[in-house]
Amino acid sequence: MKFAGILLSVLAGASPVFAATGLELPGPDGSLTLSVSLKENRAGYTLQRGQTPLLQWAPLGIVLNETNSGENVSSLELLAKTGTQEKTFPVNGVHATGKVSFVEYNVGGLQKGQTLRVRVFNDGVAFRYEFPEGTGGHVKAESTGFGVPEEAVLWTQDGKSALGPSEGVFKPVLLSAIKQKNAVRSTPILAALPGGDFLFFQEAGSFGIGWSGIKLTVKSGDPLRTVYYHDPKGFHFPDKSTHTPWRVVLAARDLNTLVNSDIVQSLVPAPDATLFPNGPATDWIKPGRSTWSWWSTTRADYRDQIKFADLAGELGYEYHLIDEGWEQWQNRNTSADKWTLLRQVVEHAAKKNVKIWVWKRWNQISNTGNDWAQMKDFFDKLKATGVVGIKIDFMDSQSQSRIRFYDAVLRHAAARKLMINFHGANTPSGEEHTWPNGLTREGIFGLEQNIWGAIGAEHYCALPFTRLVAGSADFTPGYFGHDPKRLDNASWTLQLAALIVYTSPIQHIVSPPGDLRAAAPAATPQREVLKSLPAVWDETRVLPGAEVGKFAPFARRKNDVWFVGILNGRDQRETTLKLDFLSPGKKYNAIIITDEISKNDAWKVATREVKATDSVNLTLRSSGGAVLRLTPAD
């Protein structure tokens, strides 16, 4: 089996080259059409579904070597078109197999020989600018816009931290209400249209090509506009680069289609077959569950790591993460240094069938000399201790130079069979497909924020339809203690449900050993749920009634076992969960975990036998949730 993907292409024949002021580019089933046209010699585009406009006219163009490729355009040319192409590929995360179909077009007529490569899918569009090899030079800006209707509700990351490490709270706002000039927002951005459609704006493939990442400016009366926020003066790109990253618009009629989109992964290169002979299933890449001490202790004391590794072994978890502080370890009574002590933890954990990840600050391995020799030396030392993965932190930028750092980390880590988790990071653009050793990343306002601030029910219920659509995210849920600050009104059940709803091929559970054992004693149903939680899924369904920021009900399957995770927003809710996603005619043993309405640091646990025709009545507290595990009775 070729894990680089299976591509079936039916060429429509040699399309004639013709010139026009407007070109209509429909997708495979004709439901979506991207139209490229000229307004006063300015190139731009619109998007519609059938006769319904989704995106109004917005400009195209790259300012390359002082020339805007979208300006002073006299005509547009359809240089090439394919028939419907289908592509399938393995995925670690939302489901096991990704699948897309699209029609590809190449549009000419832009300045300096640039062309526009367009792929139109049934549930989205993507385009990028291409230019002859050897062009090179200076990119000053990009003119690409997205013509979102004024009546749309935008879900964006608010707050200053969203502009660096992309850690903002997702909040809704009417586009027409954003009056300030050049209000900058990090991608992704979700637009809920009045007619019920959802548009999702992201980039794909902003790695490995010497480019800079984008953010979007948002203002009433203007299209969303692309900006190189971390390279405000532009950047030089190498002669060997022949294209930009993809600009992506997912266009979904419902939230289930949005969550299950495979468009971004389909746009980026397949994994290197030498480094990853079985793609994301390569034997040294192991999704899993992990304990983590820093959230509850804000340190990485040597003795704590032993206790947490023991807990991981007790739960059957694959990993324990040692966070910031291990590099200060020393034993004053012996000559043991940090490397010796780290190896001792690795060896102790191995007796429990647990493997170790460690934390590292990015700028301590950022010297580019001799092909990143400083980084390679550190990775080699970690590998020698038996460590299997590294959490790299505080990049806080998506500038061209920082993205080159990401590229180097993934490349040199893969050569040493090391897995990576980026924190203090930009949001993903498909890296986890090309580099499956990059299991997850932050780029999210996660549970650690409760140490300093507060998350809020709306953010919990927005994430599955905003940040997590862009790719895996290390939110680090799973607190089952009694600290009101760290729990911050969220219920234990919501914390458990987040481990199901939030996709991350490595899930870090933050509860310390004492709290977890008290909330889920050995041999209890809740302990069984915690022990059996998958890190990746074969199938995901967004259940009826889902609403961004208010209600996130998910059913996810691994093999023949279904897990249901429900996140509830600000208002207490009565709901009926239909089990019609189960296989007809089969009986299932159900573990049902629901909120204790009178308090958030407890839960109610029940078991019963169910089938696909059954329903479960649930009462969800504010910032609450529900969890079910459904195992075939036979």
Image (spheres, rainbow, N blue to C red):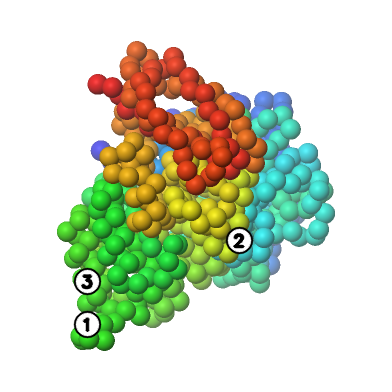
Residue 72 relative to residue 140: left or right: right
Residue 396 relative to residue 300: left or right: right
Rendered location of residue 263, percent (x, y): 50, 40
Disc ID at residue 520: none
Residue at position x 61%, y 32% in the image: 573
Which quadrant would residue 620 be assigned to in this image?
top right
Rendered location of residue 247, percent (x, y): 58, 49
Look at the image and tell me whether residue 470 can be seen. Answer: yes
Callout 2 crowding tier (Cα within 10 Å): few <14, some 14–19, many ≥20? few
* The one of 104 and 395 positioned closer to us in this rendering: 395
Distance of mark 3 from mark 1, alpha carbons? 10 Å
* The one of 507 and 225 positioned closer to us in this rendering: 507
- The kind of residue tagged 2 is Gly
User: Which residue lies under the disc numbered 2?
Assistant: 453
Residue at position x 29%, y 82% in the image: 330
- Which image quarter holds the C terminus? top left
User: Which residue lies under the disc numbered 3?
Assistant: 343
Look at the image and tell me whether residue 463 can be seen. Answer: no
- The kind of residue tagged 1 is Ala
Distance of mark 2 from mark 1, alpha carbons? 39 Å
